[in-house]
Image: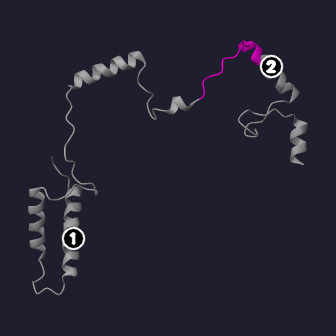
Amino acid sequence: MRTGPIKLCTSIAFVASTLAFTQASFAQSESPPTSRTEVKAQTRAANKSGELLKAGEAPLPEKTFQSTKTRIDRKAETIEARKRGDLPPPGEATYKAQLPAPIQSSKLRAERKAETLQAAKDGNLTPAGEAEDPAMVKTTPRQRQAKAN
């Protein structure tokens, strides 16, 4: 696995800061301070031996996942699940499950349209954004004016 320069710099900075803080805590010891070249050599040795953690704070995984299926098998299973309708919609898988079931109307589209046009003529439609609750309470213009005063 190839490490990028950012990860390497992060690892070196981590080791260098660790060494710097450990030196500060043992300041009374009589050993000479570690030089920059020695710190770099120690960091390279730790990197080669696998002692350095990857970027972030998580420890290395103990066992990596190894699939027992080939890529072709997984793709075929996904295509079959899509055909059966077993796949959740993209995004949040539980989204559609949280929506209420659609209400089936007993009226024809033309009847609903005629009722809406009549309600608009009578002034019984609630303006956008002014509903009191999700049920869209219907008020007349006089009721809205009385409420405003």
Q: Dividing the picture into quarters, in which one does residue 115 lie?
A: top right
What residue would you read off at disc 2? 115
Q: Count neighbours of disc 2 (C-alpha within 10 A) and say few if under 14, some if 14 to 19, many if 20 or more.
A: few
* Span colored in magenta: 100-113
Disc 1 target residue: 18
Q: Is residue 148 magenta?
A: no
Tag 2 near tag 1, CB within 8 Å: no
**Horizontal arrangement in the rendering, residue 15 relative to residue 42 (left or right):** right
**Measuring 39% from the left and 16% from the top, which residue is drawn there?**
83
Q: The residue under label 2 is which amino acid type? A: Glu
User: Which quadrant holds residue 77?
Assistant: top left
Q: Residue at x 8, y 67 (%)?
A: 41
The residue drawn where x is 73% and y is 38% is 133
Mark 1 residue crowding within 10 angstroms, few (<14) / some (14–19) / many (20+): few
Instruction: Please say if 1 is above or below 49.
Output: above
Say above or below: 82 vs 100. above
Inter-mark Cα distance, 2 to 1:
75 Å
Q: Where does the image place residue 8, in percent across and percent down from the top left?
A: 19, 58
Q: From the viewer's perspective, is 90 left or right of 19? A: right
Residue 111 belongs to the span the image colors magenta: yes
Q: Give SS at disc 2.
A: helix
Amino acid at pointer 1 = Thr
With respect to residue 134, does 14 lie above or below? below
Magenta stretch: dominant SS?
Answer: loop
| Left or right of residue 98, residue 19 in this image | left
Which residue is painted at 10% across and 67% down in the image?
A: 42
Q: Quadrant of residue 34?
A: bottom left
Residue 49 in picture, x, y percent from top left: 9, 57
Q: Secondary structure at mark 1?
A: helix
Q: Position of residue 94 (x, y in %)?
A: 48, 33
